[in-house]
Structure formats: C-alpha cells, structure tokens
Amino acid sequence: MKLTIVGLAALCLAAMANAQTPLREDSLQEVVVTGTGTQHLLKNAPVQTEVITSKMLRTYAGRSIEDILSGLTSSFSFNEDDMGSQMQMGGLGNSYILVLIDGKRIHGDVGGENDLSLIDPQNIEKIEIVKGASSALYGSDAIAGVVNIITKKHTEEGLLLENTTRGGSYGDLRQHNGVALNWGRWSSYTNFQLQHSDGWQNTSTERTLGVEEPVTDSRNKTTNKHTNWQVAERITYTVGKKLELHAEGSTYWKRIYRPQDGKYPHYDVYTYDLKYRNQSASAGGKWAINSHDNITFDIDWNRHAYFYHFTANTLVEDYEKSKGTIYYPYYPYLPDQTELQSDQQRTMATLKGVFELPLDNRLSCGLEYRYDWLKAPTRVEGSKASDWTGALYVQDEFSHIRNLNITAGIRVNDNQQFGFRITPKVSAMLSMGKAWRIRATWSEGFKTPTPKELHYRYVRQMSGTYLYLGNKDLRPQTSDYFSLSGEYTLGGLTITLTGYHNRVTDMITLVTIPNYQAPDAYIAQYDPMKTRQYQNIESAKTYGADLSIRYTHKDFAVGMGYSYLDTDAEQYDTNHDRMHRVTIDGTAHHKANCFATWSHAFSSNYLFGAGVYGRMSSKRYYQIDGDGKGYQIWRVATTHDLWRAKKTTYRIEAGVDNIFNYVDKVPHGLHLGTTTPGITIYASLTVRFNQGKKIKNIYNIKNKTNNEED
C-alpha cells in the first residue's frame, strides 16, 4: 500500500512538471458556507474546507453518498450494514459527525448510525466538508466535523422534468425523478428517489460466540436485500424583492429483508424484516435587509420510526406489561404485523442574522431551540425519554488587517439535564501573496448524552446473545481541537497539507463489562454471553495529517489524497481495577484515494468523459470481534453527454467498480474491511427536459470559465 501511495504521488508530480501551458484555477472559485455559516470563495475561506464539486460528482457517477464520500476523499471510512453506514472521520464515529442537508441536520438514527440513504445522490450540487470541532456554530454532535450536502437549485422559468434510471449488478436499481415549476413569485420542486438491491453474500462461514468451530452453511448475507423510496416537496414564494418564504415536506419508506428460510429458532433465520418510516415538515424564510445584511428563520419537525415487520408467527416479550418483574408476558405477532422499536421525533426552531459592521467586520448571531422525544418500548427503560436544548451563539469575522482574517465565535448551551456550557472557537487565515495560505484553528466541542445512551436496554441475537445497556450516570463529552494547514496554489495546481490533534474528554462508547455489573433481572432473563454498556472513558486523543494534491490542465485532471491517523484512549478495566490504553474502534492508520479523469467534446452533440479512481485503507482496529482487513478498490467510470434538442438533453453513465475483484471473505460476526461483493457493473440514463430558458450548449467549453463548468 505504501508503494501505491508513493507511486500516486509521483504520478501527480510528474504531470505537474510536464505541464507546458498556463494553469487555470479550478474549484478554488467555489463559494462555500459551511465553515463560517457565511459565503466565501473557497480560496478565501478562513476555515479549512474540502469541496466535492458538481463536476467531480458528474464524472464519478456514484450510486450512493457513501460511495461518493469514500471514493472522492480520503477522510472517511464506512462499513455499511443493516444498522446504518457506520461512518468515521478523524478517528471518531458517526455520532460525532454532523451531517447537514442545505445547512439543516439530517434526522434518521438507525442503531446509532444515520441512514444516509435519505440523501438522493442525483440531487446533490456539491458537498462541503469541514473537519474538527464546530460546536460553536452548529452545537452538539459536531466534534469530528461537519458534512454539508448542498442540493441542486432549479431557478429557470417554466417547467423542468428530469429522469435518471440506473441499474447494476446484484439487482441494484436507482431511480430519480424531479419536477420543477417556476412561475412568477412561486417555485416548486418535487423529488422522488427509489433505491433497491437484492443484496449479496461474500461467504457462508459464520463465527458463533462460544463455539470453537465456525458454521459453514450460514444464510446470513453480507448485505441484505433492501428497498427504500422517498418523496420530497419544496415550495418557495417571493414577497417583493427582499423576503422569501419556503415550506418543505418529505416522506420516506424503507424495508430490509432478512433470511427467513430454514428452521427457527436459529442464529441465521429470522421471523421479521426491518422497516423504517420517516416524515419531515418545515417552514421558514429569509429577509434580505440590504445587499449585505440578512435574517433567516426556520422551524423543522422530523420523525424517524423503526419497526419489526413480522413474516411468521412470533412470540415477543411484552416489556410494557412487565411492571418490573424478571419474567415478561409474551404477545403473539402474526405475519404482516409490526412492532415499534423506536420512534424518534425532533423539533427545531432557529433564528439567525448576518450583518456587515464597520472596519471589515461581519457579525453572525443566532438563537436555537431543540426538543428531542423518543419512544422505544423494547429498547428504553420506562419506554419514553425526552430532552431539550436552548442555545445562543455569536461569531465575528474580522478582515481589517490586510491578508489576515480572524474568525471568533462562542456558543452558550442550556441543556435540560446538564445545564449551561460555553464553547468557543477561533480560526485565522494568513494570505502570503497569491499562492500561499496558512490556516489555524482552535475550537472546543460539546456533546450531551442522547436519550438512547442514557436509557438504552436492548438484547441482540447475533452469533450469541449480547445485552446492551444505557447509563444514567453519563457525563457530557467535551473536546479541544487544534489544526494547522498550509495551502499552495498555482493556477490549476492545489496542494494542501493539514495536521490536527483532537482531544475528547469523557468520550462515550460501548464498553464490555462483567455480567455481574448488569441488573440482576436482565442477567436472569437473558443470560447474555457479553454485556456492553455506554460509559465515559477517561480521555481519547486523535492525531492526524491530511495531504491533498490536485491538478487540472485543459481536459485532464489528476489528484490524490492521503490521511494518516493515530488514536489513543484511556479506558477503565473493570476486571483488573486499572486504566489501560486502547485504540478507538474503527481506526485505520492509513487511508488514501486517487483519481485521473479526462473529458473531450468530440462534437457539439457529444461530450465524453472517463475516469479511473482508487481508494485504499490499511487494517482497521477493533477491541472485539477481530480487526478489519486492509484493501484497495479501483473503479473505471465513463460519461456520455448527448445534446439532441434545444429543450432536451441526454446523458449515459457506465462503468465497472472493483475492477480487480477484491472480496473480503471474513466470516460473519467479525469485522470487515469492506463489504464490496467484487466486480460490479452499472449503467444509467438521464433525460432532462427544460421548457424555460434556452439551455446553454454545455459542450462549448472554450467559451466558458472554469468556474462555470463547476
């Protein structure tokens, strides 16, 4: 793997050295908002921001947001399963990464992991990634970083219709439909997406806890068959020239089909599938006081519900009628009946203002209120739990000193159970000529325990019986994040090197504890092989360095990213009554990605694009159930843009993923490095009809600036 990384670096440097014509700026002209909550050109953003541009998205043609992030940046690790994406960035997991859609928090917790299939990859304009604690601006959860998905905006007058149908190996089907209608002061966009896969099985071997010999005829799949769809609507109304109002809503349905053939009870046979139901509604607006000052306001409601959908007669323990006894009465479920596992609802109200002040100051300030409500009869003690948080934040961007920008912010949180907390942040950017920029950041993070972490109670049957418990004695997590980065740009060449250190205090994680420390009633009822409980470990440290090299020249682009990570956590060993050091679960010391793309307009009616992409990871470390193997995955993608009429465009995408057919065949029940099934092929067709303005000829590249291409 080290040889691969060195080779990729040499390839990039050789391409740069051989360039004989002037270079052009590429994505540095992108406007970004995530780092400060205000608009900046990427090259002038005071907070280090990584951008996956629309041009990169179009060329890569990813099937999902997980596919896109793992393929186009070295910052992320994924290990998808039925419980979600298991995303990790900078040594910290999904619960420390704040995912936004157009600046709003995504809502869809699945076993502690966000369900990223809520995001339609065909409706993404670009992705902005800010690493490190951003709690001063975004509040709880933003300890490892922020991922902001910017969706496409359809502003042409008249009617817009778009359809994308994509098919691939293992019954993979992706469907996207969009209808945009703009007339006068009204605009509307309706989005539909469907995702389906038949799933796959990389191995029939399964390790069962407590059994020495592995099972060799398991029916469990590496990825189960699943189907999900979503319908979303956004309506906007402009009042005069300064006020815009909007209303949004969506509904989401998902079902995961589990192995059901065979004799029950058995570890690899289930009598229920997993079903999810999400709804959301929001309303708000933006008041442009003048060309510099504005006020935005929003109120959002989101619901995520998770059910067992029974496929056979099943007796289930009735926790609500137990009344604290050890033995629970049973309730019979019939096929097609459902049992609620978790109903999470969140209401948020936000008010934000951005104001230009004298001496090149830009002030941002806001108020937030968040209310979380959870009902989980089989998973939470007392069946229900709730929590609220209020916050006030202020941020000032000071640019009066030439070539120096200083951004400082502070947030005051008031939580129902944990009281007041102040979290500050300071960033600075120094420009030295046109080519060099140095950025530095210090920020604190803050995260209160979730209702699930406080009150969890769940039994998992998978390669043995696992008992998972919440902990009412948890303390809030805090962090200190330091980063220093240098950036060099010359036309189309950009080199960025960033070093960082993140220290998390009172980090919450699942810890294996002796069974005798669990409540006697649970041990007597379930006799678990292992008991795991949410606990604060004393401290956790992450150290890392990220290198990014990108170069564009005419129709050619090449780039690579490399991330080094080391983690160190102190954890109390209850068996030996002492502290010991551990590696944070999921840590991989080395990750890298690379790409080389070429596009060419053969005629006014045909634009061809091709790309080769690679992603690599070294071994991932875990405290139990084995480590995940290192891997390399390579991909070839092609795009074909066809222009047939003034109002209609056509696009074909086709490619092969995992061209060297790498498959991780580690037995079920142990950690995988990657869940890929090996070589997969895909093809898609996009048809776009625009009745409004005359569509510009996208192939006349010579007459466009590079920023317009993006």
Image (tube, rainbow, N blue to C red):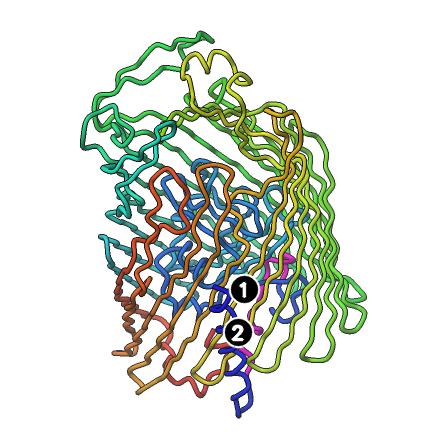
Is residue 152 among the parts visible in the rendering? no
Question: Do the residues bearing badges 1 and 2 touch, measured as CB atoms within 8 Å?
Answer: yes
Q: Is residue 218 left or right of residue 370?
A: left
First in sequence, mark 1 or 2: give its number. 2
Marker disc for residue 9: 2
Q: Position of residue 678 (x, y in %)?
A: 29, 57
Q: In front here: 622 or 702?
A: 622
Disc tally is 2
The residue located at (49%, 28%) in the rendering is 374
Q: Is residue 223 left or right of residue 298?
A: left
Badge 1 density bin: few <14, some 14–19, many ≥20, Cα 10 Å: many
Q: Quadrant of residue 463?
A: top left
Q: Quadrant of residue 129?
A: bottom right
Q: In front here: 673 or 133?
A: 673
Residue for badge 1: 562
Which residues are the magenta region?
24-38
Q: Amino acid at mark 2?
A: Ala
Q: Is residue 550 left or right of residue 368?
A: left
Marker disc for residue 11: none
